[in-house]
Image: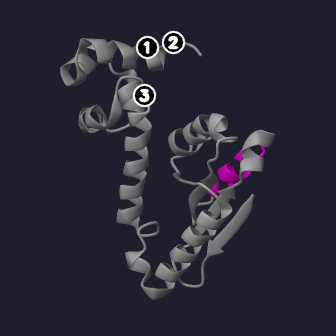
Amino acid sequence: MARVTAGAGYARCCVLYVTEADLVAGNGYRKRLVRVRNSSNIQGIVVVEKTRMSEQYFPALQKFTVLDLGMVLLPVASQMEASGLIIQLVQEQIKEPSKNPLLGKKRALLLSELSLLRTVQQIPGVGKVKAPLLLQKFPSIQKLSNASILELEQVVGQAVAQQIHAFFTQPR
């Protein structure tokens, strides 16, 4: 796993790159993610290599990174795409730090909200139309997971409400 840190008077940011090999090898990457998350003066951005081979491991990483740690997760197809993204981050930081969409507090929040939206879209029965409606009523995964079927029905109807409730309550 590679780590790139921006500092020197700029907003401190650490980009953690989780390779295909890291995902396939197991949960070794988790310690570094937790270490960065627990650092109060560094914002962590996780870039993950999502390929056909690593795709089956991605949901666990996504849950851990976005839901458990509240960090930004950006999937890329290759190391080349990751390097381009990191170069762009650095160039934007050098030009005008406040315009970097991944480092500004407001924009980082928007990116975090986008990650949350994408996560909710992955819940069975939800998709692109119902996810924003759910997040308006239940602005966090915790609130959504604690919602009753009746509360969910008011937003998405009975059938989808039951799917969502089952998703969060049935053991895996």
Please, what is the dominant secondary structure of the magenta stretch?
helix
For discs 1 and 3, the disc positioned in front in the rendered view: 3
Q: How many marks?
A: 3
At label 3, which amino acid type do we have? Answer: Ile
Q: Quadrant of the N terminus?
A: bottom right
Discs 2/3, front: 3
- The residue furthest bottom is 95
Eyeballing the image, is 54 above or below 36? above
Q: CA distance from mark 2 to mark 3?
A: 13 Å
The amino acid at mark 2 is: Gln
Q: Which mark is residue 123?
A: 3
Name the amino acid, label 1.
Ala
Quarter holding residue 138: top left
The residue segment tinted magenta is 27-38
Which dot marks residue 170? 2
Q: Residue 40: percent from the left, percent from the top?
A: 58, 61
Residue at (41%, 68%) from the top-left corner?
101
Q: Circle 2: is it few (<14), some (14-19), or many (20+) Cα within 10 Å?
A: few
82 relative to 71 in the view: left or right: right
Residue at 42% from the left image edge and 52% from the top image edge: 112
Residue 70 in picture, x, y percent from top left: 51, 47
Q: Look at the picture and state if 172 lies above or below 133.
A: above
Magenta span has 81? Answer: no
- The residues bearing labels 1 and 3 have C-alpha atoms spaced at a distance of 10 Å
